[in-house]
Amino acid sequence: MSERQNREPEQDRERLRLLEFQLDYLRAELLHLTHERYRLIYSVSGHVYRFLRPIEAYVSGAANAIVARFRPPPPDATTPSASGEVAPAARGAPLPAGRLLVDVTGTIKRDAGTGIQRVVKEVTRGLYSGESFDMPAVAVRCEGGRLLTANGFVAELVGGDAAPDSEIAIAGGDRFLMLSDSWNAFDELAPIFAKIRDAGGEVVTCIFDLIPELYPHACHEVTVPRYRAWLRKALLESDSFLAISRTVADELADYVAAQGLPHRPGLKIGWFHCGSDLALRADAAPRDKIKAAVAGDAPVFLAVGTIEPRKGQRVALRACEDLWARGRDVRIVFVGRRGWFEEAVASEILGHQEFGRRLFWFDDADDDELSFLYDHAAALIFPSYAEGFGLPIVEAARRGRPVICSDIPVFREVGRAGAIYFRVNDAKALAETIADFLDGRRFADQDQVLRVAWRDAARRIVEVVAREDWSRRLP
């Protein structure tokens, strides 16, 4: 029996375990929402809401009808290539000299303070750090089909006075990089794409992960069809993709080949690594409630990430409950905004008997307070089962903090030999790992974790584009 055949039963068991985990999460969310509905029905507010329910149903039905009316048809199953194989990319001949026009429109319009916006802002800061790169890079924004400089956005990041934004004339060899989230921008940017190609340039799309395709049940119901439509359009409009990790680059290449998705012939795929340095204020001081969460002798474990299904907050909470039951005096601090399908776990955290004592959650911590929490944590816990990179891993390690994280491919890429890994979605395994760490049976070496500055991330982006240094190339 081949090695591949030996691996398949174990892979099937892991897939089933992941599906069971997702089912348990959604079941808890459904039970919580059902309970809340019953509570409303038998309360005064519930009787008021009863008269609004038919209106809600009408609006919901109308919205669903509109979505169905304009939902894109399934893509053609054919691809421009006769083979589904994906080959490593040889370094191609450089395109004519031009500029790298870095689109930041999405972050200017919608800065939700999540990982994507952090990447956009920090890469832009790195591009304007004063260092010399292989090609000039300019932050731009799109307005009414025109391309403008993003001087105000840049000034907010790096300081100084901002000149008024002015329209950019696309020149020969310019590359257009959609660094910001471009889910809703492709139609608006279509005239820009045409001008770029007419001038002998190329369109590059940054891709942060494939989670809506690979783990649709982890996403908001609106995200999956929107992402699906975006990816298929991006594959046809983009000359190349830049992923935020080698893992995502490989996942994209393999997924496109396996699904037979139409794409531009010779589509190039590359990657860069995110930075780990935080831009902090010299005079910043954490709020009293932040300081109180880490006060005392009990070891503090920090979990950073939006409250959503794939981040594993319930896994971390169950692990701590296991430790508390054994008499272990540990603290867990969650940092992250509310996301989606989070009502049940949020209610569980806020209503927990340990909340405010050994369990804390801050949904509004800024970078300075996050840095303070990193500095006072015994270790970072990152129990996510799907990620595109894992910024908290590199941020914690850069602050000298050990990292305990799920054993998934992208975390192995980022955490390398320096992190401590536990079986994904297994609260018992996490509890045992924390206990081993506290007792000195397992060690983390944060110096071996990936360490990249944001200016290095910016340089890597420019080098991949300017030097045609792509890692994969589709037929």
Image (cartoon, rainbow, N blue to C red):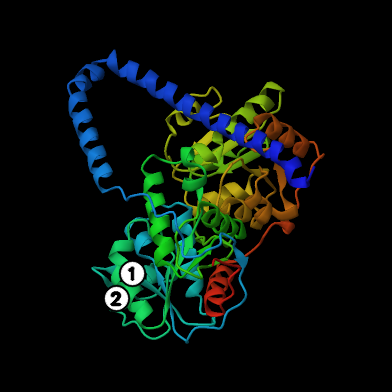
User: Visible in this render: residue 71?
Assistant: yes
Q: Are marks 2 and 1 in contact (CB under 8 Å)?
A: yes
- How many numbered tags mark residues here? 2
Quarter location, residue 140: bottom left
Q: Secondary structure at mark 1?
A: strand
Q: Nearer the viewer, mark 2 or mark 1?
A: 1
Q: Residues within 10 Å of mark 1 (few under 14, many from 20)?
A: many
Q: Which residue is mark 1?
A: 141
154, 61: nearer the viewer: 61
Q: Which residue is mark 2?
A: 165
Task: Indicate the position of residue 214 as horizontal and vertical percent values.
Answer: 52, 45
Q: Which comes sooner in the sequence, label 2 or label 1?
A: 1
Q: Name the residue rendered at 30%, 74% in the picture.
A: 147
Image quadrant occupied by the C terminus: bottom right
Q: Is residue 23 left or right of residue 66?
A: right
Task: Indicate the position of residue 248 as horizontal and vertical percent values.
Answer: 57, 56
- Toward the top, the furthest residue is 42
The image shows residue 297, relative to residue 260, as above or below, that is: above
Q: Name the residue rendered at 52%, 60% in the picture.
A: 280
Q: Is residue 76 left or right of residue 25?
A: left
Q: Amino acid at mark 2?
A: Asp
